[in-house]
Amino acid sequence: MKTYFVTGGAGFIGSNFIKYIIDKHQDIKIVCLDKLTYAGNLANIEEELNNYPDRLTFIKGDINNQELVEYIFDTWEINYIVNFAAESHVDRSIEDAEVFLKTNVLGVQNLLNIAKDKWDLGEREYRNDVRFLQVSTDEVYGSLGKRGYFTEESNIQPNSPYSASKASADMLVRAYNETHNLPTIITRCSNNYGPYQFPEKLIPLMINNILNGKELPVYGDGLNVRDWLYVKDHCRAIDMVLEKGKAGGVYNIGGHNEETNIKIVKTLIKELDNLLKENEAYKEMAATKDDYINESLITFVKDRLGHDKRYAIDPSKIKKEVGWEPTIMFEDGIVDTIKWYLDNQDWLKLITSGDYKNYYEEMYLDR
Ligand code: NAD
Ligand code: DAU
């Protein structure tokens, strides 16, 4: 029976990953450590915590907390660390970078150091039964022009404080692999979309604003390009890399789904309008929306500072070495995503009202 130590598991991708592996591998245990910052929401994994009390343990805490991380290693026999915990929003890093360095750099160093000691690597060669997987980002490669793709060999040229902090963590992970034989893996993924994404990121923010008849703030000319990947495809990739990836390896993960921001926003307006008009299930909701779901909501606003122009991933290494490729077409994934937000209005309201912050206390009061 393997034990996964998942950090940041109450956030967007981490919670999707817990759902994916708890269902896929019936014989594993998961210990989730999450600080429950503004981006952490225990409601994201409430169902799993209720359904699998023997297989999933939640611990509220910081990846920087040495004593707590050591306690986790002493209490469970950890096979895999999958580190999702991070400050993840570029705009916030432009406002104030400090917490990005604390969590994304020092926090990772704390995890690496404890893993090195507790896995007792000493002078030994790689242990093949353990892995430290750092969830990184394509943003460490900087920005592309009109052509070309990021490969694992591309230069590391981060442009925002967020991506600089993630690149720094990648360097530390590399160093612990080289210096201490820690069996690490780094994955660098493009933009994720799907259920449970915090509504400050482009897609859920726009969905929420459309539903509430609010302006849709598109930065600059809207022509910046992102390479969109459905979150479940990402989770499957991480699961496969843990099993089949080479220790010390770096794997790019991308969806072959490049699109401009303005096209994404227009697609959301069109698909949301279609769903509300044509789907019986949303008839009641549609009746309250009048006619405001149209492109007049789009507002071009001041550009993000240092706004990377284009990201695009070449995922051929992970396909060749691990056998992973994306399976969910953007056209399908985006409709499923919009449906999820329509079906989970309570989840959105829990966040927009701020009530999700009380979830931890409410859930753990009786335990
Ligand atoms: P998120 O912001 O939704 O979730 C981050 C989680 O980490 C939250 O639950 C938060 O409470 C927790 N956390 C923050 N600081 C912590 C700390 N000090 N100790 C413990 N927990 C802490 O982020 P996400 O979008 O799910 O991203 C997860 C990871 O994937 C991040 O490392 C991010 O850099 C990376 N990534 C994200 C994307 C994307 O499109 N969202 C793409 C590529 C890589
Ligand atoms: O590429 C991977 C990265 O993707 C991850 O490492 C980050 O954690 C994740 O947040 C994401 O970063 P982006 O900056 O690309 O995502 P965001 O959703 O913030 O913005 C996507 C694009 O949309 C970007 O070009 C900025 C633009 N944008 C964003 C917002 C929030 C707007 O035009 N308007 C907005 O209101």
Image (cartoon, rainbow, N blue to C red):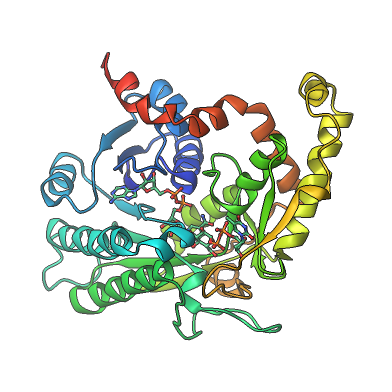
Where is residue 285? Give x, y as percent. Answer: 76, 23
Query: Is 148 rendered above or below residue 32?
Result: below
**Position of 340 compared to 355: left or right?**
right
* Residue found 82% across the figure and 49% down from its top: 296
Question: Foreground residue, 302 or 69?
Answer: 302
Q: Position of residue 349 (x, y in %)?
A: 55, 28
Along the line of sight, the residue nearer the viewer: 149 or 104: 104
**Where residue 102 sits in the image (x, y, percent)?**
25, 60
User: Does 72 appear above or below 182?
Assistant: above
Looking at the figure, which quarter contains the C terminus?
Answer: top left
User: Is residue 174 shown left or right of residue 198?
Assistant: left
Name the foreground residue: 305 vs 148.
305
Specify the farthest residue to the right.
278
Q: Is residue 74 left or right of residue 125?
A: left
Q: Residue furthest top?
A: 366
Count of numbered labels shown in the rendering: 0
Measuring 18% from the left and 48% from the top, which residue is drawn there? 69
Q: Which residue occupies 79% across, 53% down?
A: 266
Q: Residue at x 54, y 39 (%)?
A: 196
Q: Is residue 143 visible?
A: yes
Q: Quadrant of the N terminus?
A: top left
Q: Is residue 135 visible?
A: no
State the image quarter where residue 177 is shown: bottom left
Specify the quadrant of the image occupied by residue 127.
bottom left
Percent across and percent down for residue 200 are 53, 48
